[in-house]
Image (cartoon, grey):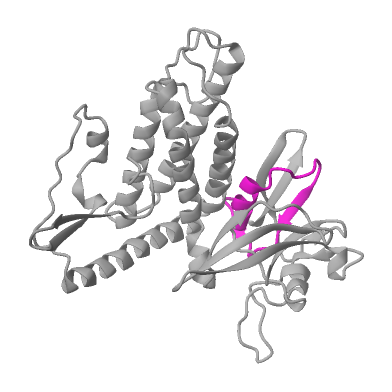
Amino acid sequence: MYWFASPLPTLVVAVDIVSRHAWYAWHLDLFESPAGVFQSAQDTVTIRIPERNQLNEAGWKNIRHDLKQHFGSLLDMISEANSSSRLLPAINTLARNVTNLLKLSKTPPPPNSASMTEQEGLSILIEQLEHKSILSVVRTLLEHVRPDSGAGHHMRAWIDAYEGMVLTAYPRLNTLPEHGPYGPDLEFAFAPKRVVETRHRLIEAGLDMIMLLTARHRAERGDEKRYLTQEAHSPNDEGPRLTVAKQPDWATIEVRLVRLRVAELGFPDGATTSEIIGTQHDTDQHGHPAPFTGGKGAQLGLRLCPPQVGPECRLEYNDQPPEERLYVAMKPISSSDGEPRIFVLEHNADGMSLDAVRARPDDKWQPTDLFIFCTQS
């Protein structure tokens, strides 16, 4: 289940230690229906690896080719989802779901349904609804991916694995009404031990999917993979630290998220989106296309954030002060209504959230509005 719930392919290798020969297969090729394996009551499973898949020089060449195709098909999937203006809402919803699952995972489940309190029952219900939402979001994206593509095959396997893990903890998940009502007579079942065992795996699977859905923008910009770690705010108002792993040697560098008010960028009376981050039609000094380089942030040596900074920062920034709104300086993404939008991290009376706000080139921002930029040390 762990293999199939991750967007990363797993290489399964069988080794004959006497003859010193080995054969390989991708986990996606081992089973026609992962769901059939998950639903089996058997303690073991038989897998068959083709003899032609020998782990030799030709085999490694095929593996490299397969990996290129695999990630290419995933990027195609993301491109298709993005072109149909569904990517940003999906990332937004998944980030909210995973954030809530992280909060719920800090409280141990009740030992059984008979002795649980009303509050414990409500918590168990909410946890199930978050899982249903994640499955619904990914299934909706899958509807807009070619069924015969590698991405389609992988997405279906991810859904089967995620749902399979959830059902081991909540066997009646699929009987819950989609939109209520959830009255006092609602019956559901859960296995406390399995809830504890699967929580962290499901959260990791959700985070993997968020990273996957933002991978296309890293590929377009040549950006490295970034992971956020929590850091206390310093006097110069810097935000959380980003640890960056760079290919091919995976050396790490640090990138900080710097928070600046619009007035601090040099606009005491406010500024437009184009003045802050530039536009798609910006050019360099030679007149060549250089999208989003004409804003004041770029002039000050700052970089626009990759879009994954929004959801990752939302997951990490747990001590955001009440009433604060942080706008992510990023290349806007078109949403379902066709409007360009950027992420905003907000803490209001309803709690902490990740949302998206309209950012057309001529939209005006107030002098006190806070933006997050990236700066590399």
Front residue of 350 and 111: 111
Residue 22 figure quarter: bottom left
Q: Residue at x 36, y 62 (%)?
A: 71
Q: Residue at x 15, y 59 (%)?
A: 23
Q: Residue at x 48, y 15 (%)?
A: 111
Image height check: is 84 above or below 42? below
The answer to if 330 sits in the magenta stretch is yes
Tell me where residue 136 appears, x and y as whole percent.
Answer: 45, 37
Image height check: is 269 above or below 205? below
Front residue of 284 and 351: 351
The number of numbered discs placed on residues in the rendered structure image is: 0
Is residue 49 visible to the viewer in this orientation of the structure? yes
Most distant residue in the bottom direction: 286
Is residue 143 visible to the viewer in this orientation of the structure? no
The answer to if 261 sits in the magenta stretch is no
Image height check: is 361 above or below 184? below
233 to the left or right of 181: right
Q: Residue at x 55, y 9 (%)?
A: 184
The span picked out in magenta is: 309-337
Most distant residue in the front direction: 18
- The N terminus lies in quadrant: top left
Image height check: is 186 above or below 29? above
Front residue of 137 and 2: 2
Most distant residue in the right direction: 268
- The C terminus lies in quadrant: bottom right
Tell me where residue 341 appears, x and y as whole percent.
Answer: 65, 56
Front residue of 281 and 40: 40
Tell me where residue 219 appears, x and y as whole percent.
Answer: 48, 68
27 to the left or right of 14: right
Tell me where residue 101 appears, x and y as whole percent.
Answer: 55, 35
